[in-house]
Image: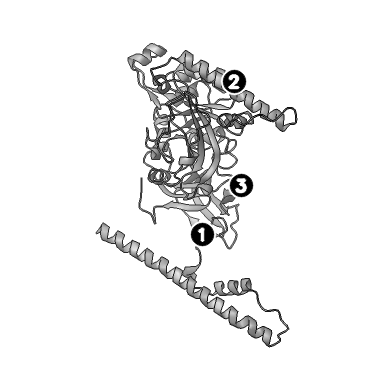
């Protein structure tokens, strides 16, 4: 039965598309014949009026075409009419201020949030389409800052230990099968990065995952430079130690920052034009704070190296990615340096013998990593999946697990860790991460609290465009 339905639907769609093409072709042919006949006739009769141009005739004929042949313009999208979404609770989660609005309305126009506030004080223009989601909640689209499923999986170039010039942007597949499921869980933006086979795997890309075309999906390229401090890179060739890795990485940073400084001097008229080095170009973006370093860093010692070498010595914007195995003991130092923590894929620490020996931790305790950062004063704590290590559609479950193991979220810290914290951390909070006027209309409609595993996603809008709707689409997750 399913196969028969699929074939019939495809046949119907083909017939519909063929009909549109035929109708358009007939109308265009008729228009050209009419224009050919009318214009000379009018001129021959000595009409004092100027003959209508081909553009004017085409517009007139287009207006008379059947509705089915016209492109569908959806409320909320760019170029379409306005859209108002009414909800029982809107989780707005700005960086500062009130974190939610009860009985709210969000007004969307041209893919942006035009207004948001209590329904009683936020007027809806008369010509806007109104969608009332009832008792369901709305929130900003979620952001995953560590993903390997944006296209070709887990890109690793293993010849050199540092590959700052490698770019994963050429391998992006914006709407691949894995991401079709991911967007159904409310994730709308990801940082697609290289693997951690070497110390510097290359440059990631930030893009939205529910759109079909690269140009529409792009948020920023480069999205980050991927640094892996320890673990996987130690198996490079015959095996290397952390001392050599740190020395080699430090030398690369010295070359890169000097290169970026020479270009900055040239652009300010204070020095000669440097020779272009494509491998080090990323450092120009790092020096100017246009991107950050996302650091695969775990174990207290290498988290310390990230903080002291990358942030304190070179002054580069960086954030902790992973941060397990007692890395949380540096939470106070990280906060002092302005370094945020994006936790995952592990969100708990189990007392293995190796872990106890490293950290001196309680052998009977199972620790929530986010909670341990929080206890030490860290407030900017987010979550990631390292997809497909954790399935990419389970990002919100990472926050739920953190809450289960002690992470306090009286002020919506779980939702903030899925939205505004990663947005600020990645430097894209001017566009995404909260429901505020002027930001992209990336909106998720859920049945309840995102940190509650019993909640599920009903609708997802990206740039005001409906990309997933369980009332029309098959539920994917």
Q: Is residue 260 visible?
A: yes
Query: Looking at the picture, does residue 476 appear above or below residue 394?
Result: below
Residue 87 image offset from top left, x and y in percent: 49, 50
Look at 58% across and 72% down and name the residue there.
58
Q: Earlier in the sequence, mark 2 or mark 3?
A: 2
| Mark 2 crowdedness (10 Å alpha carbons): few <14, some 14-19, many ≥20 | few
Q: Which mark is residue 301?
A: none
| Mark 1 crowdedness (10 Å alpha carbons): few <14, some 14-19, many ≥20 | some
Query: Looking at the picture, does residue 332 appear above or below residue 72?
Result: above
Nearer to me, 381 or 176: 176
Marks 2 and 1 close (CB-CB < 8 Å): no
Foreground label between 2 and 1: 2
Q: Which mark is residue 254?
A: 2
**For the residues marked 3 and 1, what is the alpha-carbon distance in whole angstroms?**
19 Å
- Report helix, strand or loop for mark 3: loop
Q: Is residue 332 visible?
A: no
**For the residues marked 2 and 1, what is the alpha-carbon distance in whole angstroms?**
51 Å
- Residue under numbered circle 1: 74
- Report helix, strand or loop for mark 1: loop
Marks 2 and 3 close (CB-CB < 8 Å): no
Residue 102 image offset from top left, x and y in percent: 52, 46
Q: Which mark is residue 438?
A: 3
- Report helix, strand or loop for mark 2: helix
């Amino acid at each position: 039965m399913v196969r028969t339905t699929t074939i019939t639907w495809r046949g119907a769609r083909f017939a519909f598309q063929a009909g549109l093409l035929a109708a358009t072709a007939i109308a265009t042919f008729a228009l050209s014949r009419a224009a050919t006949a009318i214009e000379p006739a009018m001129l021959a009769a000595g009409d004092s009026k100027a003959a209508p141009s081909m553009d004017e005739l085409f517009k007139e004929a287009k207006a008379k075409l059947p509705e089915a042949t016209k492109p569908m313009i959806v409320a909320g999208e760019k170029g379409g009419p306005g859209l108002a979404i009414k909800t029982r609770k809107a989780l707005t989660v700005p960086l500062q201020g009130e974190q939610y609005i009860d009985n709210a309305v969000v007004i969307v126009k041209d893919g942006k949030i035009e207004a948001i506030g209590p329904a009683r004080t936020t007027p809806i223009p008369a010509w806007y389409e109104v969608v009332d989601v009832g008792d369901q909640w709305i929130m900003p689209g979620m952001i995953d800052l560590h993903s390997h499923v944006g296209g070709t999986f887990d890109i690793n170039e293993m010849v050199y230990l540092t590959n700052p010039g490698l770019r994963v942007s050429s391998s992006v597949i914006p709407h691949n099968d894995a991401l079709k499921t991911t967007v159904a869980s409310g994730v709308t933006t990801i940082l697609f990065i290289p693997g951690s086979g070497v110390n510097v795997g290359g440059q990631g890309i930030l893009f939205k995952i529910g759109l079909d075309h690269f140009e529409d999906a792009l948020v920023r390229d480069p999205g980050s430079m991927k640094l892996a401090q320890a673990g996987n890179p130690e198996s490079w060739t015959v095996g290397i130690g952390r001392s050599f890795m740190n020395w080699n990485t430090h030398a690369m940073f010295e070359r890169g920052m000097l290169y970026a400084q020479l270009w900055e001097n040239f652009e300010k008229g204070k020095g000669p034009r440097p020779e272009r080095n494509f491998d080090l170009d990323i450092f120009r973006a790092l020096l100017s704070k246009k991107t950050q370093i996302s650091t695969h860093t775990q174990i207290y010692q290498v988290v310390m190296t990230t903080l002291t070498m990358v942030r304190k010595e070179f002054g580069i914007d960086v954030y902790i990615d992973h941060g397990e195995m007692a890395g949380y003991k540096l939470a106070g130092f990280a906060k002092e340096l302005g370094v945020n923590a994006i936790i995952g894929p592990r969100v708990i620490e189990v007392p293995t013998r190796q872990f106890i020996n490293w950290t001196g931790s309680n052998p009977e305790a199972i620790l929530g990593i986010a909670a341990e950062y929080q206890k030490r004063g860290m407030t900017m704590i987010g979550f990631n999946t390292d997809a497909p290590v954790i399935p990419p559609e389970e990002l919100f479950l990472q926050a739920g697990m953190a809450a289960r193991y002690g992470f306090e979220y009286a002020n919506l810290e779980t939702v903030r860790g899925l939205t505004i914290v990663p947005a600020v951390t990645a430097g894209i909070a001017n566009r995404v991460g909260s429901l505020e006027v002027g930001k992209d209309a990336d909106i998720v409609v859920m049945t309840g609290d995102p940190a509650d595993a019993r909640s599920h996603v009903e609708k997802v809008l990206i740039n005001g465009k409906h990309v997933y709707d369980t009332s029309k689409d098959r539920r994917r997750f």
